[in-house]
């Protein structure tokens, strides 16, 4: 109980939508992350849910347009925070996998470089 109160008090000191530079081993697929992204990457659903409940915008740091961002925020606002945490964690995992994929340019049929 004491640790929970400590964590909640400390969350209030951060800019929930700010992007922070991370120097954690393994988090090399992006240079900056929000608290929500970092908690999702660490698979800390309880912390992620608390960050989202505190008002963090899970779309900050993504490369989606304004219309898509508004739709995502609207849809997430209708769901319980536990579902939001799962969705955000899944999206962050996909973003990491996408950043780690080696992009190859070439024809799938013949293999020639494009």
Image (cartoon, rainbow, N blue to C red):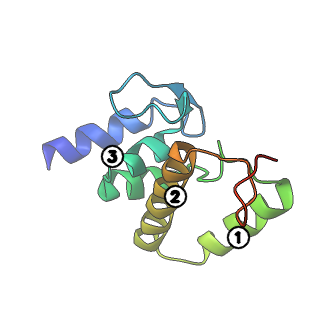
Which of discs 3 and 2 lies nearer the camera? The answer is 2
Q: In this rendering, does residue 53 appear at all? A: no
In terms of depth relative to the viewer, which is nearer, 96 or 113? 113
Q: Name the side, left or right, on which 77 lies relative to 113.
A: left
Displayed quadrant of residue 75: bottom right
Query: At which x and y percent is residue 14?
Result: 48, 31
**Around disc 2, counting alpha carbons within 10 Å, would you say few (fewer than 14), some (14 to 19), or many (20 or more)?**
few
CA neighbours of label 3 inside 10 A, class few (<14), some (14 to 19), many (20+): some
Residue named by callout 1 = 74
Neighbour class for label 1 at 10 Å: few (<14), some, many (≥20)? Answer: few
Q: Earlier in the sequence, mark 1 or mark 3?
A: 3
Residue occupying image coordinates x 14% and y 50%: 1
Q: Which residue is mark 3?
A: 42
**x then y, percent, for residue 97:** 49, 52
Q: Which residue is mark 2?
A: 94
Compared across the picture, whether 5 is left or right of 39 comes to left
Q: Which mark is residue 18?
A: none
**Residue placed at 61% from the left, 70% from the top?**
77
Where residue 27 appears, x then y in whole percent? 41, 34
Left or right: 5 in relation to 107: left
Q: CA distance from mark 1 to mark 3?
A: 25 Å
Q: CA distance from mark 2 to mark 1?
A: 21 Å
Closer to the camera in the image, 37 or 57? 37
Give me the C-alpha separation between circle 3 and circle 2: 14 Å
């Amino acid at each position: 109980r004491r640790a929970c109160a400590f964590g909640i008090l400390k969350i209030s000191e951060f800019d929930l939508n700010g992007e922070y530079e991370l120097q954690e081993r393994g988090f090399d697929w992006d240079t900056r992350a929000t608290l929500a992204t970092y908690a999702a990457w660490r698979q800390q659903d309880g912390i992620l849910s608390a960050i989202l409940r505190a008002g963090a915008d899970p779309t900050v740091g993504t490369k989606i347009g304004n219309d898509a961002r508004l739709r995502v925020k609207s849809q997430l606002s209708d769901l319980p925070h536990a579902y939001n945490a799962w969705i955000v964690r899944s999206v962050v995992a996909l973003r990491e996998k996408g950043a780690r994929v080696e992009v190859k340019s070439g024809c799938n049929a013949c293999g020639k470089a494009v």
